[in-house]
Amino acid sequence: MDSTKLNKENLIIGVHPLQGALGAGKDIDKVFFQKGLKGEHIKALKIELRALGVYYTEVPIYKLNKITKKNHQGIVAFTSPVAFHRAQEVIQSIYEAGEDPFLLVLDRVSDVRNFGAIVRSAEFFGVHAVIVPMKGSAAINYDAIKTSAGAVFNVKICKEPSLYNTIKTLKNSGVMVVGITEKANKSIGAPSIQKPLALVMGSEEDGISKDLLAECTMALRIDGKGKTGSLNVAVAAGVAMQAYC
C-alpha cells in the first residue's frame, strides 16, 4: 500500500466535500477548522459532527496550509480507512453471540506504530474490540495499518468521547476492568481473573490517567527481573493480553 496514495485518499478539503462525505456516511477520523471561522454553515457542521461523535478542533491557518496547498476554505478533514464503532453496541453484540467480551482500552496511546503493534497483538489474542478516545489517540494511517499487518481491519475499533464514562458502561455491563500499571500493588497472574474482561493500557508518557485508574475494578503490574523500570506500551499490552486470552 502506497502511503502517499492513502494520505491523498483520506483527505477531505473544504465545506461542501465534508458535507458530502458526512451525507454519504463516510467514517470521519477528525476535522480541523481554521480558528475564528464563522458562519451558519460552519455552526451547522459542528452540530452535525458532535451528533455523530466526530472529533474536531480549531487550529491556526498555517497548520491547514501545511496539510494542503489547495483552497481549503478553512476546513480539512480526514476519513478513516476503518469503520468506527461504539463500545456499548459492540458489547451487546458480543453477548448476543454467546461470548464473553475481551476488550482493550487505550488511554491516549498516540504513537501510530505502538497502536498498530497493539492491534496486531489484540487480533492474535482474540480481543473483540480496541477502545480509544476521540481526542488524543493515534491516527489510523498507513504506518498504523502496516505495523498492524492489516489487523486493524479484523478488530473492531471503538472511538468514545469519554473513556471514563465508557469504563462505567463496561462495568455496568458485567465487564471487569483491569488497569495495567507499574504503580499497582498486585502483579498479573496473582488474582484469579476471568472474562468478561477489559484491560486498560496508559499513554506512552504518563500511563493511565488518575481518573480512569480510580474507576478500574483493580490495577495490576507486570513484574520483571532486569534493571529496566518499565516496558514499552505495545510490549506491555501483549504481555497482559497473553496472560488472560
Image (spheres, helix red, strand yellow):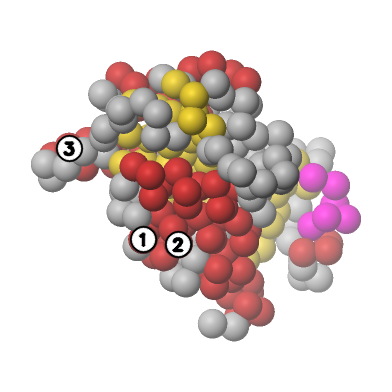
Give the vertical position of 35 relative to 163 (above or below).
below
Q: Residue at x 85, y 47 (%)?
A: 60
The three-letter amino acid code for the residue at tag 2 is: Arg
Q: Residues within 10 Å of mark 1 (few under 14, many from 20)?
A: some
Percent position (x, y) of residue 58?
Answer: 75, 41
Residue at numbered disc 1: 124
Q: Residue at x 65, y 34 (%)?
A: 207
Instruction: Determine if the magenta segment contains residue 70.
Output: no
Residue at numbered disc 3: 95
- Regarding mark 2 in the picture, which secondary structure is present there? helix
The three-letter amino acid code for the residue at tag 3 is: Tyr
Label 1, label 3: how far apart the Cα atoms are: 21 Å
Secondary structure predominantly adopted by residues drawn in magenta: helix
Residue at numbered disc 2: 120
- Evaluate if marks 3 and 2 touch, with contact meaning CB atoms under 8 Å apart: no
Which tag is nearer the camera, tag 1 or tag 3?
1
